[in-house]
Amino acid sequence: MKAWENLLASLEWTLGSDAIESWLRPIKIVRFDAANLYLRATPFQKTWFDEHVRPLNPSLLNNNERPIRIHWETDNPALTKQKTEAPSYQIRPDHLESEYSLDTYLPLSMNEMGLNMAQELCKGEPSSFNPVFYFGPTGSGKTHLLMAIAQALQKKNQSVFYVKAQTFMEHVVNAIRLGLMKEFRKTYRDIDALIVDDVHQLARKNATQEEFFHTFNTLHTLGKQIILSAECSPAFLQEIEPRLISRFEWGIAIGLSAPDATKRVSILKQKAQQLDLELPSELYPYLVENFPSSPKAAIQAIHSLALRTTKVRDQHHADQLLTDLLKKESADALTSEKIIKQIATYFGIRAEDLTGKSQMREFAQPRQIAMYFCRKLLRIPFQGIGRLFGRDHSTVMSSIKQVDKAVEAKEPPYAQSIEAISRKFLMRLPK
C-alpha cells in the first residue's frame, strides 16, 4: 500500500532506517480500502508503534488527502510455534564515525569549556567529574565530542560502550522480550566507560529509565566514567524521573552553542574536503542559507552531493542534485503559524486565543511569548507581528521587551516557558 510505504519513508527521518526495518517493516498488511488500513502485528510490535510512532502524530492519507484509519489484528504468541533453540541476541554499541575526532572539531569560543573537558577525558585518566553531561541544540557538536572521546579511549585499550539513547532503549526492550536481562546487564556494566547520546529521548520510557537508573548506579559505584548528552540541561529535562535527573547533576553539565553562519561555512568546507567533493566557494554560503533548520541539514546536503557527484559545477547544478532535500527543508521551515500553534499547544489553549482580543492573563502571557518567538526566530518586523496578533507595533515592542527582561533575569514563568518551547523548536534563540 503506497500510503503505508510513504509513512514509513517519512518516519525514517525521525526514527532512523534501522528502527523502521526492525520494527515496522515486519508488520503485515492484511487488507485496506480508501479509508481503512488493517495491520497484523505481534503485541510487542503494536506496543512499539504506540510508544514511538503514535506520539509523532504521523499523517496517513489516501489519494484524496483524507485520513486513513489504522486497525490492528494482534497475533497471539501462545498460538505461535516456538523455537526450541535459545534466541540469538547480540548487544552492540553504535557505530563511531572515524572523522569525528578532536582534531576535526571546529570549536567556538563559547564551547571552549566543552572542548577542554573532552581533551581531559581523552587522556583516559579518572575524572573528578562523573557524569559529564553535555547539552545544547542540534548541530552544537555534542555527538562529535562524544564519538571523539569514545575513539580516544578505545585507543588506550579501554572498554567503551557508545550508544544513542534510542539504541539503549531497543537493547532493553529486546532483552526483556527475550528474557535475557542477565546478558544485557553484563554487557552494559562490565565496561570502563559508558557514553550515551541524546538521553532526553528516554522521556516517558519508564522501563528503560528504570534499567538506566540501575546501570548508572552500578557504573558510578565502580568508579567507571559516564558521559551523556541531551538537548537541554538536566534541570530542564521533561518526563525523566527525578532520581535520574539528580544523578545527571552529580558531575558537571556543560552547555554547547550551535555555530553561526561563518563557522558553519568553515564546517562545510572541512566536510567537503573529507569527502573529496569539489565545490565552488560561493556555494558554501548558499547551502547555509538554504538549509537553515540546523547545521546538520547543510552537512547532510554535502554528503548527498558527494554521493551523487565528485564536482558541483554551479548553483543550478546543486539545485538539481538536491531537489529532494530542498523540498524537505522548505516543508520543515519554521513559520509564524507553526510558532503560534506550537505555543498554543504548550499552554493548552487554542491558536485563536493567541491572536484574539482577550486580555485574560492565561492568554496574555502566552501571546507575549509568541510575539517574542516570532521576532527572535523569524525576525519579523514589529508591524508585521502586530498584524498577526491584531495589535499595534508599540504594544508588540513593549511585550517583547518585557519577555526579554524576564528571560535575562531568569524570572518565572517566562524563563522556564522560553527554555521549554525552545527545545520543542530544537534550536537556540539567536543572540
Image (cartoon, rainbow, N blue to C red):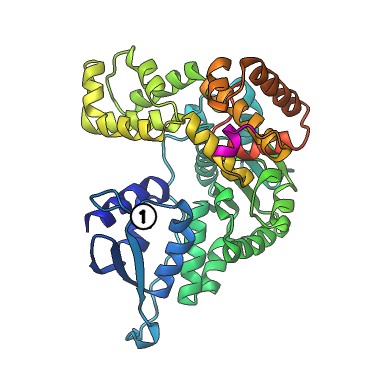
Q: How many marks?
A: 1
Look at 74% across and 25% down and name the residue there: 408
Q: What residue is disc 1 on?
A: 18
Residue stretch in magenta: 352-357
Whether 355 is among the magenta residues is yes
Q: Is residue 356 left or right of residue 305?
A: right
Q: Quadrant of the C terminus?
A: top right
Instruction: Check disc 1: other Cα within 10 Å, few if <14, some if 14-19, many if 20+.
Output: few
Whether 265 is among the magenta residues is no
Look at 58% across and 25% down and name the residue there: 390
Q: Nearer the viewer, residue 403 or 392?
A: 392
Say if residue 397 shows up in the picture: yes
Looking at the picture, does residue 356 appear above or below residue 94?
above
Amino acid tagged 1: Asp
Q: Is residue 76 left or right of residue 195?
A: left
Q: Position of residue 381 (x, y in %)?
A: 54, 15
Magenta stretch, main secondary structure class: helix
Look at 35% across and 69% down and name the residue there: 71
Q: Position of residue 242 (x, y in %)?
A: 72, 56
Q: Position of residue 271 (x, y in %)?
A: 38, 26
Q: Nearer the viewer, residue 323 or 417?
A: 417
Looking at the picture, does residue 78 appear above or below residue 67?
below
Element class at badge 1: helix
Looking at the picture, does residue 307 appear above or below residue 240?
above
Say if residue 426 shows up in the picture: no
Where, by quadrant of the figure, is residue 185 drawn? Answer: bottom right
Look at 52% across and 65% down and name the residue there: 172
Q: Quadrant of the N terminus?
A: bottom left
Of all residues, the one furthest to the top in this rendering is 282
